[in-house]
Image (cartoon, grey):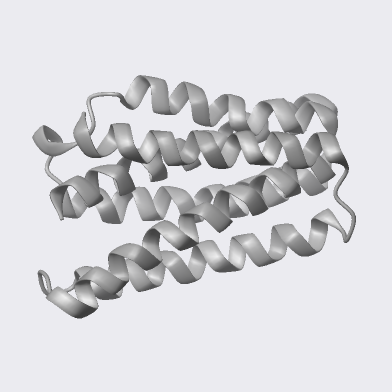
Amino acid sequence: MVQELRSDHAGETGAVYIYQGITVVARWRQDAELLAFARAHGDTEAEHLKLVEEWLPPALRSRLLLPWRMAGWLTGALPALFGRRAVYGTIAAVETFVDVHYQQQIDHLQVHGGPDGLLPLLLRCQADEQHHRDEATALAGPHTPWLLRLWCAVVGSGSAAAVVLARRI
């Protein structure tokens, strides 16, 4: 489970920085709605990061935190330059990936067991991520332009690659 917690820590670190990137651009664009979205979601991700850090000592965390921070910030800031819809689509894509990632860990713990308190933590984080996904999906609207679909596919692939790296390094 250390490898999985390491990937969760890296992911929550990246998530905090996604919302920081969105926040910078939303301030620059003076977009109060997007700023409120980023602050609310960012606060939840910061809480998740703190909870995961309570489970994973510093020596066992990913040594690639700087790249995770940079990638997260860019994953938030770049779509924010294109507007709310791009941000909401990006967040829906990220949270869809995170939901599946947490579910795999939850399934493992339900079959094999694990440390007391870890399963409720993962279930809580997953529920928050599902809420973020559902909210972002609703805000993005029913039609996703092809360029945003392409970007979201890149984000999903990048998230998968990041998990593989974070488990090892």
Q: Residue placed at 40% from the left, 57% from the top? A: 101
Q: Residue placed at 14% from the left, 49% from the top? A: 2
Q: Quadrant of the N terminus?
A: bottom left
Q: Quadrant of the C terminus?
A: top left
Residue 152 x %, y % = 68, 41
Q: Is residue 109 left or right of residue 164?
A: left
The answer to whether one can see residue 41 in this image is yes
Residue 38 x %, y % = 65, 45
The answer to whether one can see residue 19 in this image is no
Q: Is residue 48 left or right of residue 33?
A: left
In this rendered view, identify the residue nearer to me: 80 or 165: 165
In this rendered view, identify the residue nearer to me: 81 or 23: 81
Question: Looking at the picture, does residue 1 appear above or below residue 74?
Answer: below
Question: Looking at the picture, does residue 49 appear above or below residue 106?
Answer: above
Residue 168 x %, y % = 20, 33
| Quadrant in the rendering for residue 118 | bottom left
Q: Residue placed at 65% from the left, 40% from the top? A: 153
